[in-house]
Structure formats: structure tokens, C-alpha cells
Image (tube, grey):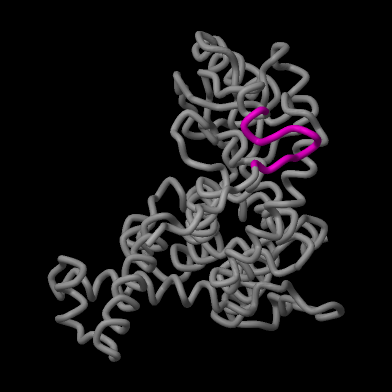
């Protein structure tokens, strides 16, 4: 019996050229890169203008991470340039480090029509693949247009990272990266350790249910994860805290027209005054951590700063240290400080407004 003829797949053509031709015309090159964060966003136009010709800068808005890319051998010079420019302009760099031998291509070097057609093709394909992750995406990017824009940005990000010499089709590479980048949304918003723990537990539970048609017991889940029951319970507490942060519904500021006035100090006892001050500060903190309505939802300012809120609240009124809170939430003290500093800058302005 003869084998059925194999169906050949025609190469995809975008902007008049095939994918393979495009990758060959703009191959992956070795670059030097400087990673860093800042306590507040940089003016990108001014910052780019201060960089040498051929150097690019991008901002991962979900993580607040800047990446400055230059030619091989520029790592030390770029690090010094970034440090000096930020210091002169009054910006504090956080976690600045240089990386050499980064394999990347610059999407802007590809024909514009190729990129436009490629995004039109892979955008809908990516959205379809992400349907099972859409509830996670909606937690961070609720608007449909912003979801479409984010997916287009992910396609371009995959273009920059795709290495055609590995023999993997671009579509397959993009599919594997999409799952990772969706997971990174939660990492950026709620902390890497707690989010990774939640994801690992969910996968283990889903696999057990698929095999046994029931949820695992505590002991069974601990065995699946290779943990003791005590470690499982501690991690479960971190996940519960994470879900509690997600479910905070009060991060929408003080209602319009609501007045929160301190009582006259001559008429109020100290303990009542203290409660009123705490109420005033609580409202100011909540408003400071609410999303900025002028920012896109996929930007840091467009999402509620829940980690900054809980860091301020529990260390100010909850009697916890940052070290204790870091262990409970499964995130680093440094990450908590970044979010708390963000809240502090807005909080100071809120308190000045209320005092005025």
C-alpha cells in the first residue's frame, strides 16, 4: 500500500518576501546590553538623545526594566554613560548590570511592510492561542484594544529574539514565548516567587485531577511537588496572600466629593485624633496606589500598585517588618522597596493636596 503524498507547506510571505529571506537579511547579532530600573520613569526622548548613534533603549513596562543595547564591546562605556546621565538628571538607578554576548536582532532593520504583515498574521493567531490564558491577561490588561496592542508588542519582541539557526519555525518559537510572557505579567505585578509558586501548584493540581478525576489531598500534593507538608502549607499561605492582593477592590481612590476632615484638636481626644489621622493616611495611600487613569493599563502606572500598598500598610499599621512581609509574600525586600517608593512619591503629593 503506497503512502499518501505529503502535503507541502508553502513558505509564508509578508511584505513581498518570505520569512526565511527576512531572517537571512537581518540575522541575529551579538550585542552588549545594560539592564537597570529607576525609582521613577525616565523621559525616553531625552534619554535616547543622550545615547551614541546605533544604541537602542527599550522599556519593559510590565517589569519597569530598561534595556540599553549597543555593539559588542560597549558594555562598560554604556554602563558608565547610564550611571552618569541618571545621576546628573536626578534619577536613581536600581540593579544596574551589564551583559555581554546577547543574541538579538533589531526589528527596525526589517522592511516595515514585512513587519506590518507579519503582525497582522501572527496577532490573531497569538490571540487564539492565548484564549486559555485570557483570564490571567484580563487581571492586568482589561481593555480589548490594549490586549491586542500587547500581543503585537509580544510578536515584535519574539522577532528580536528569534534565532533562525536553531531550526525552529518562528510560529513555534512565538507560541512557547507567549506562555512565558503571560506568566511574567503576574510576576511583575505580584512578585516572582509567589507567582511561580502559584503556577507550580496549579499545574500539579491540574495534572492530578486529569489523572484521578478529583483534587489531591494535602499529602498527595506535597508528594507531587517534592515538598514536606509544612513547606506546602507555608507556600499555600503565600499563594492565598497573593490572591487576596488580587481581590483588593478598594484601590479606586476616594469617591468624588467625599470629605475626610480631621477633627479640631481642641475638641478631640488624642486617641480619636490618631484614628482620624490613620483614616486620612489610609485614604491617601489607597489613592496613591490606584491606577493612573491617564496611563495605558499595560503600563506600571495603569495598574494598581498592590505590593506598594500592602508594604506601606502592614509595616506602618500591621506591625510587620519588611523581612517578615517578604517571607509571607514570597518576594524580595528589594522588589517591595521599588513598589513602596513608587507609592511614596504619589502619597506625598496626595497628602499635600489634602493638607492644602
Q: Which residues are magenta?
A: 11-21
The quarter of the image holding the N terminus is bottom left
- Residue 215 image point, x, y percent: 28, 88
Q: Examine the structure image and report whether residue 55 is included in the region drawn in magenta.
A: no
Horizontal side of residue 206 vs 300, given as left or right: left
Q: Residue at x 76, y 56 (%)?
A: 296
Q: Which residue occupies the foreground of this view, 336 or 112?
A: 112
The residue sitting at the front extreme is 1
Residue at 75 percent across and 78 percent down: it is 260
Q: Looking at the picture, does residue 305 appear above or below residue 342?
A: below
Q: Describe residue 87's horizontal placement relative to residue 296 as left or right.
A: left
Q: Residue furthest bottom?
A: 214
Q: Position of residue 74 (x, y in %)?
A: 54, 10
Q: Is residue 164 above or below residue 74?
A: below
Decide if residue 188 is in sight here: no
Q: Nearer the viewer, residue 246 or 225?
A: 225
Q: Position of residue 19 (x, y in %)?
A: 65, 36
Quadrant containing the C terminus in the rendered view: bottom right
Q: Nearer the viewer, residue 55 or 102?
A: 102
Residue at the farthest right position: 257
- Residue at 29% x, 72% y: name it: 204
For residue 152, side relative to residue 163 (left or right): right
Above or below: residue 257 compared with residue 22: below
Quarter of the view holding residue 26: top right
Residue 123 visible in rendering: yes
**Position in image of residue 274 (x %, y %):** 57, 75
How many numbered marks does the figure carry?
0
Amino acid at each position: 500500500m503506497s503512502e499518501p503524498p505529503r502535503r507541502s507547506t508553502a513558505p509564508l510571505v509578508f511584505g513581498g518576501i518570505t520569512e526565511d529571506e527576512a531572517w537571512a537579511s537581518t540575522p541575529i547579532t551579538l550585542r552588549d546590553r545594560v539592564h537597570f530600573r529607576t525609582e521613577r520613569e525616565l523621559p525616553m526622548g531625552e534619554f535616547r538623545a543622550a545615547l551614541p548613534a546605533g544604541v537602542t533603549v527599550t522599556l519593559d513596562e510590565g517589569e519597569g526594566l530598561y534595556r540599553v543595547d549597543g555593539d559588542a564591546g560597549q558594555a562598560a562605556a554604556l554602563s558608565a554613560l547610564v550611571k552618569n546621565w541618571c545621576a546628573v538628571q536626578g534619577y536613581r538607578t536600581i540593579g544596574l548590570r551589564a551583559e555581554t554576548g546577547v543574541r538579538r536582532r533589531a526589528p527596525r532593520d526589517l522592511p516595515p511592510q514585512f513587519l506590518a504583515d507579519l503582525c497582522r498574521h501572527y496577532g490573531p493567531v497569538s490571540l487564539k492561542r492565548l484564549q486559555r490564558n485570557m483570564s490571567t491577561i484580563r487581571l492586568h490588561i482589561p481593555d480589548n484594544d490594549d490586549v491586542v496592542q500587547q500581543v503585537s508588542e509580544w510578536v515584535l519582541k519574539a522577532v528580536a529574539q528569534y534565532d533562525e539557526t536553531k531550526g525552529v519555525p518562528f510560529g513555534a518559537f512565538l507560541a512557547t514565548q507567549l506562555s512565558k510572557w503571560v506568566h511574567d505579567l503576574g510576576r511583575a505585578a505580584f512578585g516572582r516567587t509567589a507567582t511561580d509558586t502559584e503556577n507550580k501548584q496549579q499545574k500539579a493540581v491540574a495534572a492530578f485531577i486529569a489523572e484521578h478525576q478529583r483534587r489531591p489531598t494535602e499529602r498527595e500534593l506535597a508528594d507531587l511537588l517534592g515538598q514536606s507538608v509544612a513547606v506546602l502549607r507555608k507556600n499555600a499561605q503565600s499563594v492565598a496572600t497573593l490572591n487576596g492582593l488580587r481581590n483588593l477592590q478598594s484601590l479606586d481612590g476616594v469617591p468624588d466629593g467625599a470629605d475626610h476632615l480631621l477633627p479640631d484638636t481642641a475638641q478631640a481626644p488624642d486617641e480619636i485624633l490618631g484614628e482620624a489621622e490613620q483614616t486620612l493616611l489610609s485614604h491617601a495611600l489607597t489613592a496613591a496606589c490606584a491606577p493612573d487613569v491617564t496611563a495605558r493599563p499595560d503600563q506600571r502606572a495603569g495598574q494598581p500598585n498592590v505590593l506598594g500598598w500592602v508594604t506601606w500598610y502592614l509595616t506602618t499599621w500591621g506591625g510587620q517588618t519588611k523581612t517578615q512581609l517578604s517571607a509571607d509574600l514570597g518576594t524580595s525586600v528589594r522588589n517591595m522597596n521599588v513598589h513602596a517608593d513608587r507609592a511614596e512619591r504619589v502619597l506625598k503629593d496626595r497628602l499635600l493636596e489634602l493638607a492644602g
